[in-house]
Image (cartoon, rainbow, N blue to C red):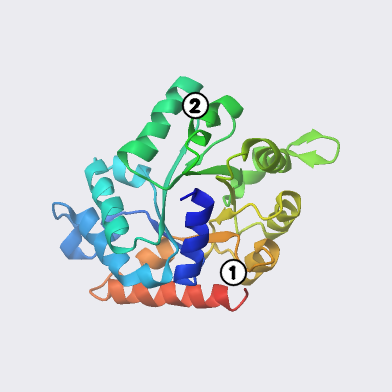
Amino acid sequence: MSFADKLAAAWKSTNSLVCVGLDPEPKKFPDRFRDAPGGIFEFNKAIIDATREFACAYKPQFAHYAAHAAETQLEHTIDYIKATAPNAVVILDSKRGDIGSTAEQYALEAFDRYDADAVTVNPYLGRDSVEPFLKHADRGVIILCRTSNPGARDLQDLHVGPGKKLFQHVAETVAKEWNSAGNCMLVVGATYPDELADIRGRVGDLPFLVPGVGAQGGDVAKAMAAGKTQAGTGLVISSSRAILYASSGADFAEAAHRTAKDLRDSINAHR
């Protein structure tokens, strides 16, 4: 199955555009997980169990595992998603970007070691740094375009030609030149709805990973109006902290369930 087909199937089978970001911060865990061996995996497992009926995708953020020497728990987390939420797309959020020979190793890390369905990459080094990922035609390559952070304007708004900014050039380059296998997506933050609409107008139905709702303050209604396709899809809307840490008490899983459901329902109200 192609990545595009898998993503479309995930949207349809879950009736959802929600992506649950799995960004573990043990200091925020309920007490029983905080210092327990394997606590990151056990916390993730409970979150997945609580949210899988509302999630078209899960997005573990690599640094949150590597910082705690928890790469094995990341592997177990991905295995658990694939076993219990087989329709969901697994996105490894590692934002890789390096020269070609190193990028080849990062691609093997994402797709062979972790068996991710997609990985986030940085396009700053150009086509040859992304090519090793693109060659995996059955996996998604999610390219940073207009990120959700406040400093995005520092570089992404630089003019690179008459009337064109860098993020617009990235969007058009990916859509027109890099997406020959139909496996590309763009990262476009919900915190910049005007830019989200601009990019949608430039790239047609190319799907977007949309961070920035929840803790970062992005507005669901504005993001949907700006970015959805005519079919009412085209977006994978990610929320991490707002779902994971909806409660720090014994009811954390129930709170995550409610928050994920509310986000799914809010998105669907604007489809």
From the viewer's perspective, is 60 left or right of 193? left
Residue 228, how many percent across, how many down?
65, 64
- For the point 62% across and 39% down, which residue is it? 180
**Res 241 visible:** yes
Report crowding for label 1: few under 14, some 14 to 19, many 20 or more residues within 10 A (C-alpha). Answer: many
Callout count = 2
How far apart are labels 1 and 2 at the CA level?
33 Å
Where residue 154 sits, quadrant-wise, is top right
The amino acid marked with disc number 2 is Asp
Where residue 84 sits, quadrant-wise, is bottom left
Label pair 1/2, CB-CB below 8 angstroms:
no
- For the point 14% across and 55% down, which residue is it? 36
Residue 269, how many percent across, how many down?
59, 79
Where residue 259 sits, quadrant-wise, is bottom left
Q: Quadrant of the C terminus?
A: bottom right
- For the point 48% across and 62% down, which residue is it? 9
Q: Report the front residue among 269 and 2.
A: 2
Q: Secondary structure at mark 1?
A: helix
The residue labelled by disc 1 is 220
- For the point 57% across and 25% down, which residue is it? 128
The residue labelled by disc 2 is 98
**Res 215 visible:** no
**Residue reaching furthest left?**
37
Vertical placement of residue 103 versus 25, above or below: above
From the viewer's perspective, is 19 left or right of 204? left
Residue 34, how many percent across, how many down?
20, 57
Q: Secondary structure at mark 2?
A: loop
- Give the mark, 1 or 2, whose residue is nearer the N terminus: 2
From the viewer's perspective, is 221 left or right of 248? right
Report crowding for label 2: few under 14, some 14 to 19, many 20 or more residues within 10 A (C-alpha). Answer: some
Residue 88, how many percent across, how many down?
40, 60
